[in-house]
Amino acid sequence: MNQDLLGIRYPPPGFQAEGPVTIGSEGENTNPSGNVTVDAYPTQGSGNAVSSGGVFERLAQKEDAIAPVQDNPTSYVWVGNKTWRLLDTIVEQIVNNLIGSGGETGGENPPEYLTELGLEGIIGQGITAPINLTPATATVYEAFTYTINKNVFQGGDVTLVSAPAGAEVSIGASDITVIWSPTHKGDHYIIFWVGNGKLLGRVASMKITVLPAETVVPVGDTVLVASSIAAGMLVNIYNDGGVPKIRPAIATEVGRRAMAFVTQNGAGGQTIVPKFMGTNPYFTGLVPGTMYFLSWTTPGQISPVGPNSGSGYLWQPVGVAISPTELELDIKNHIVRSA
């Protein structure tokens, strides 16, 4: 019998590799109560003790839970059931079955691949609602109300993404209502997200063009020229006995204030289309970033300052220079001098 450094004897009394073992009190090898049988290997249905050597031998013979990867490990993926398959093979199978009409699962759980129908069940049907909704026109400082029928979204779930400042957008069961009093001219947009209730969707937008309050005539209409004008001039539109007419603007009186500009020459009696917004490219010597005013000395032209005298004369900002030759039209409310 051997002893370790602590004085504990090993192997324990009565130990043997297999077969009948007699266990008695410490230091003895007899047991009045009977014997304990040790099985050489794990045996199904046996209640006997098992030799540790036999257990390790059997473990060494047990099949791996996952079969080892052969060849290049990076080319294989584990597909379950202790099976590794080439990645290229798996991808090819998925693509073929998405295109084809084969069964979706083949009984596997989870499915081994998806058909086109199965993929649609996950991500839903595509959204075909229009990206650009019918545009609308509004007038600065005037109440604007507009209704969008939700049928244009073809049953998609509609969510508001963004809208101009101050606009109220109400999404109802069948319609979307927009209520707004715009304070700035130009193009403004309302943006919606149209989803299919699953993973697909698209963005839809509606453009609202806000025009100056004093256009006098509808945007795009031709106007009769009252007196000779040149391309680039700021112009005034007035009512001459029920007939709208156009003439050069000048800051000497309210009735000659600027309302638009023109992009072509015109003689008296001809017609021309005024532009109420946009870039006027017919100037020279402008300082970019500078606000310009309607001139009180030269009809149809601009000045970096307003008139410094003259009762009834106007201080009317008309735009900001964006280059030495271009003025971005931004006609604002005027101030009338009292002296």
Image (spheres, rainbow, N blue to C red):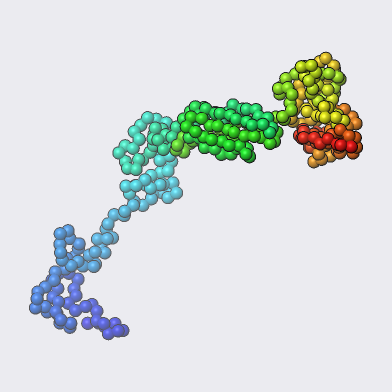
Q: Camera-side residue: 109 or 143? A: 143
Seen at 54% across and 35% down, the residue is: 170
Q: Quadrant of the C terminus?
A: top right
**Residue 11 location (% of width, % of height):** 23, 77
Tally of numbered discs: 0
Left or right: where 143 falls relative to 293: left
Q: Quadrant of the N terminus?
A: bottom left
Left or right: where 10 falls relative to 93: left
Seen at 31% across and 37% down, the residue is: 106
Q: Is residue 300 above or below residue 30?
A: above
Res. 198 image quadrant: top left
Q: Is residue 113 above or below residue 38?
A: above
Seen at 36% across and 52% down, the residue is: 68
Seen at 35% across and 40% down, the residue is: 111
Residue 36 at least partly seen:
yes
Q: Camera-side residue: 293 or 253? A: 253
**Residue 86 location (% of width, % of height):** 41, 43
Q: Camera-side residue: 239 or 23? A: 239
